[in-house]
Amino acid sequence: MQPETMQNKPDAVIRAEGLTKVFKDFWGRPKVHALDAVDFEVRPGEIFGLLGPNGAGKSTAIKLMLGLLYPTRGKLDVLGNSPRDVRTKERIGYLPEESHLYDYLTARETLTFYARLFDMDNETARTRIDDLLQRAELEETGQRVVGEFSKGMRRRVGLAQALVNNPDLLILDEPTSGLDPIGCRQVKDLLTELARQGKTILLCSHLLADVEDICDRIAILYGGRIYAYGSMQGLLQQVHYSRVTFPELAPPAMSKVLAQIREACGQEPEVDRPAQSLEQYFVDIVKQAQSATDRLPPAVGADDDAGTS
Amino acid sequence: MRIRIQIQRVAAIARLSAVDIVRQPVFLLFVVTCTSLTTLLPLLLVHQFGEEGKMVRDSALAFHFIFGLAVTSFAAGTTLAREVALGTAATVLSKPVSRDAFFLAKFLGIAAVAIVFSICQSMATHISHVVALASRHHRYLLAAPLIPALGLCVAGLINYTTRRPFVSSAFLCTAGALAIAFGGLAFAHSAAMEWRLIPANALIAAALVVLSGILISLSTRLRIVPATAIGTALLFVGLVSDFAVGRFADSSIFAYLLYVMIPNWQHFWVTDGLSGGGVVPWSYVGQVVVYAALYLAGTLSLGIIAFRFADAA
């Protein structure tokens, strides 16, 4: 199923045409067809989701976009150039699936190293790194090396290094992997904000709820081929059904409304109560708990009071 | 402008590689073991028959070569093959860094580590030599083996008070302690200093740099174990290349080509030249450095080509 056809817009940020990658064995014989004549494009300012089960070819596609692998056949343009062009990479930020970091560096040293790879003066780099450490809530990690960090903290460092050059195109492989629900929400909010600023984002994720929350368009890969491609709304919308949401009605009023709908469409309407997402519920509960904790007097003072009363 | 940026990138990656190696506990283990064994030599050797200096010298240079081989194998394996396998190479190559620059920077990082290791070992060799010759009249010199331990203690104190990473502090403190001891002995016992050892240490350092180039070039296509195995085989074949291949070089073009291709480590090993008060002329050192540079240029060129067309993820 391909509801949306490939449109060869000249301003596509990423354009793949007939992209094929075959991994070969030691003797040069084909071993795995990771991608098989894949066509897709990512447009400026959108959040594009590349979905698929394990081994579908998502990470291979990303590595081709970064020039880390050579395509066997087909054409791939990134920001109008070959992905192997070093200048193209000046405008790209990449977060790998696992946070591949140097374990013996601190968070600040890691970001300073990546900042040095771009043409950035020291003052700009320092300001940018301070800002990223603050956003990632890593300012207090001090002399601790990345190897001692939890998976979530490593993910934050990884995301910060992807943003160090203020990229136009952000390629993220499982950006919320290892993060707690609050961290996931913060990352999703950050990505939405970046897209609003005009950045283009391509992300791979197994967490479909995350993709559904933030992606404008998606492609679903299976066995190296695209089986669905298009806007989130276009792919998911059930066009033969309508939903009307209104405040709770008294039983007589509800009966009247249902009778009118029944008469208009000739079918029995379904009535349910909308539920908020578990993520939203969790975030609300944690926020309430945080504000309740903030209102409590300090623990030492409480003990003293208890002792004197 | 572009060249300045490229140099800046290469310098950043080379520095990171060196720091990453120096902060790994295995590296500290090699450095502390090698310098401790070297400074312990005067106490371990018995039945010296007036040959204390030669015995210490030969053993210390052998330690330099063997532990240097271990350091460079570990560093080369850790740096490129492991980074490609773990994905850190992919993260760096997703930045505006060409593969050639990445490869060269990795080599420079390892070469810097090999040179720093050689400087530490050279100081330890000189200290050991002074202790072997002068400790009979100056008993306090017998405390020299405590120098690396002193460095570790200071690093422990720094780690406790400032929470700085122990391993890198320990390396810096050990190197600092060796430098202070070396400077002090050069001032107080200048007559016992064996300055002739500097060219010998410099040649071993050059050999280690060449070995780094070979190992990192191999690790563009091979994993750590096969790359180190081939590197070690080349080391042993190179030590006997004069005998095994060199004597047939005049009569066979195949033997001649093989002789040229195999690194001749005998050029870098001058212990025999130091015996009997011999001195290694700096002109010889210069010739060997040129040989090393040419050999490196060839090896690294092949490494660059191999890495340019390799899948880096």
Image (cartoon, coloured by chain):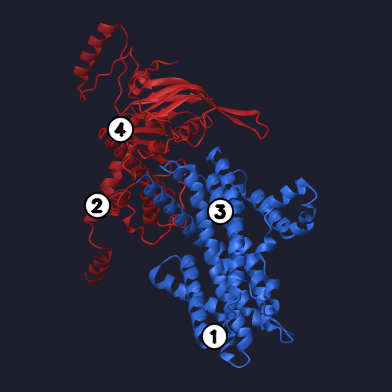
Chain colours: A red, B blue
Q: Which residue is mark 2?
A: A292
Residue B77 coordinates in the image, percent (x, y): 59, 53
Instruction: Determine the CA span between mark 4 and mark 1.
Output: 82 Å
**Secondary structure type for disc 4:** loop
Same chain, labels 3 and 2: no
**Chain letter of disc 2 in the image:** A
Name which residue lies at 36% across and 28% down: A13
Residue A302 coordinates in the image, percent (x, y): 25, 65
Instruction: Determine the CA span between mark 2 and mark 1.
Output: 73 Å
**Up-down relation of residue A40 to residue A259 (above or below):** below
Q: Which residue is mark 1?
A: B190
Task: Count residues near mark 2 (Cα–Cα under 10 Å), then give few for <14, some for 14-19, many for 20+.
Answer: few
Task: Count residues near mark 4 (Cα–Cα under 10 Å), then give few for <14, some for 14-19, many for 20+.
Answer: few
Near-viewer residue (B103 or B243): B243
> Which residue type does callout 1 highlight?
Ser
Q: Which residue is mark 3?
A: B78
**Chain letter of disc 3 in the image:** B
Say which quarter of the image contains residue A183: top left
> Which residue type does callout 3 highlight?
Thr
Instruction: Determine the CA span between mark 3 and mark 2.
Output: 49 Å
Instruction: Determine the CA span between mark 2 and mark 4.
Output: 23 Å
Q: Which mark is residue B200?
A: none
Instruction: Determine the CA span between mark 3 and mark 1.
Output: 40 Å
